[in-house]
Amino acid sequence: MLNRVINYLKSLSLFHIFVSLFIIGLLYGAISLYMKYTYFSKFMNQTRVTSVKAKPVNVDVAQYSYRALSIIESNESVDITSKVNGVIDQISFKESSYIEKGQILYSIISSDKIGSTQIHAPFSGIIGLSQKKFSENVKKGEILTSLDDYSTMKLPMDLPERLLPYLNKKLSFFVTTDSIPDFKYNGELNFVDTRINTQTRTIEAYALIDNGTRLLKPGLLMKVDIFLEENNNAILVPEQSLLSINEKHYVYKVVEDLAKLTEVKIGIKSNSAVEIKSGLSTNDVVIYMGQEKLKDGSKIKILN
């Protein structure tokens, strides 16, 4: 074997030997440089510290809600009209006051020769402004005033058809209005229609609100948050902590002074928080700012 090598070397020219040694030297240098670079990169990854912000997961109620807008109405409302042609003989109420059911509102002397006709309140409520004055002529069917029952108010809503899967159960809601900042009310939907409006692709619904203080008035714009789904004792993380990679979801979990990339399964999203159904425990801490600079296993410093 040795003789073959010696004979082979003797057969090579000095030029070939030089070229072979040069190529071997280049390969050795490249391998050495690669190994040094790999070692340096690993060293830098292990020693570089990235500043991040992190917080413990929150254990709370996860709610999926839909906000609807509603123009509030009286639960019971009617226009008071004249039943005959004639002349107003008496107005027996103070405008914008509370009226009891059966109370006399107007006396009208009929021009049809049927005597004096009286108009009574069909239910208790707040009487509106009179559209006619004493001794004025009126026609049969003409509107004289309005009557509204303010003790209970109605919240009509048109809900998009995509909410249909959630509408087969009792749904709670929370309502506010910018017009009365201190007003807040919790309740349940009282009615959801069984049909979808084919023109608007919406479902009619309404809720009733107790208004014993008569604070609410018809025509107010109300914001109604309807709670469609609710999970108690849910693990919640800030929405900005979530990463999407190849249609999967991840967060960086703090493990001592390292960032651990952790796959998670998500649930309800609400109010800038996301429910984590699996992948985290209640005592975990997640990074929510600075994670774009991280890799799995990066050394971190948590900023207050």
Image (tube, grey):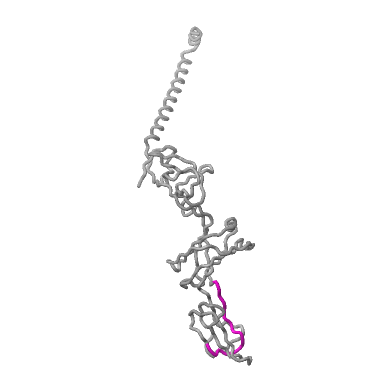
| Residue that lies at the very extreme toward the top in this rendered image | 3
Q: Is residue 289 left or right of residue 87?
A: left
| Residue that lies at the very extreme toward the left in this rendered image | 304
Q: How many marks?
A: 0
- Reply yes or no: does residue 84 show up in magenta: yes
Residue 24: quarter of image:
top left
Which residue is rendered at x = 47% and y = 41% of the image?
A: 262
* Magenta stretch bounds: 75-90
Q: Which one is in front, 228 or 160?
A: 228
Q: Which one is in front, 47 or 274?
A: 274
Which residue is rendered at x = 48% and y = 11% of the image?
A: 9
Residue 80 percent location from the top left of the image: 57, 81
Residue 139 percent location from the top left of the image: 60, 86
Residue 164 percent location from the top left of the image: 59, 57
- Reply yes or no: does residue 145 show up in magenta: no
Q: Which one is in front, 112 or 10?
A: 112
Residue 144: quarter of image:
bottom right
Residue 127 percent location from the top left of the image: 51, 79
Q: Is residue 288 left or right of residue 158?
A: left
Q: Main secondary structure of the magenta part?
A: strand
Q: Is residue 142 above or below residue 160?
A: below
Q: Is residue 13 above or below residue 137?
A: above
